Amino acid sequence: MLNTLINSQEFNAGGINGNFSAGGIPTELVIIYNQTGIALDWTPYSGAVAYFLQVSLYPDFRTTFVDTTVPLSTHSFTDAQPNGQKRYWRWAPTLDGVEFLTPWSEVGSYWLDTALDEQMTLQRNEWGLANPDDMLDQREFDQFPTYVTVKRNLYRYQDRNRLGELLSEFLTVKGLITLNFTGQQFLEHADLDEVERFHNDFRTFFLAAYKDGGQDNPMPHVWLVELANDPSFAMISAGNPMYLQGSLTFEEV
């Protein structure tokens, strides 16, 4: 039943975070887990007596491994799905466990890899980078940029037989994430140094965020990415290399 309602806000098209004043909003979330005990938290909806919750290995929720109704805006469970992979989740409020009070929330995500040495937790309104080989090697941007995330469909065909007949077809949805540091959302030189280090030393790294999609409904997001282009920024004012402006585009791998 829950899969029949299409979520029009599955991927955030861009924006700036909302205000900080609404009550009950989680202030930090784990986005990358190194243990199978998962705790999801989201913003309470006024008047709701329960929440639909779905968790899937697929961004279109074609199948789910959590599909339940819970009484509170939080849920803990054991994730026994394949290791080293991204998960997608969403929630919606209900009065009776049947009817939706709103459409599905923005789709959030987390990553599970029990081989990681640490987890990654971000405060609301943070974007961060993490080294997959050393999760203690992390960097959070000092300024919160405006952002745009775009989904792209990539079709992969695999497992053809000797006659060339297609035995299976895989659809993956990968993101292109652009962070814009202009105006008040400038990039500090120390941040650029770290971006260049991740780009040159690791090439592929985690990009994570705990950001608003809808007003006062922040959700966690994670991507395994590489930079689409070498970082290139300009000084905001001539002779002052500390504050820079420009954009970074990350490509999900």
Image (spheres, helix red, strand yellow):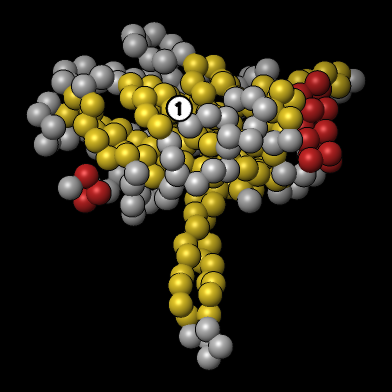
Question: Of residues 164 and 206, which is closer to you in this image?
Answer: 164
Q: How many marks?
A: 1
Instruction: Indicate whether 234 appears above or below 71.
Output: below
Q: Position of residue 50 (x, y in %)?
A: 19, 24
Element assignment for label 1: strand
Question: Of residues 194 and 188, which is closer to you in this image?
Answer: 194
Q: Which residue is mark 1?
A: 37
**Horizontal side, residue 98 vs residue 46: left or right:** left
Outermost residue, right side = 239
**Horizontal side, residue 178 vs residue 231: left or right:** left
Residue at coordinates 50% horizontally, 34% vertically from top-left?
Answer: 110
Q: Position of residue 161 (x, y in %)?
A: 53, 84
Residue at coordinates 21% horizontally, 17% vertically from top-left?
Answer: 46
* Label 1 crowd (10 A; few <14 / some 14-19 / many >=20): few
Which quadrant of the view contains residue 100?
top left
Residue at coordinates 48% horizontally, 65% vertically from top-left?
Answer: 170
Outermost residue, bottom side = 163
**Horizontal side, residue 36 vs residue 67: left or right:** right
Instruction: Indicate whether 219 appears above or below 247.
Output: above
Residue at coordinates 63% horizontally, 35% vertically from top-left?
Answer: 115
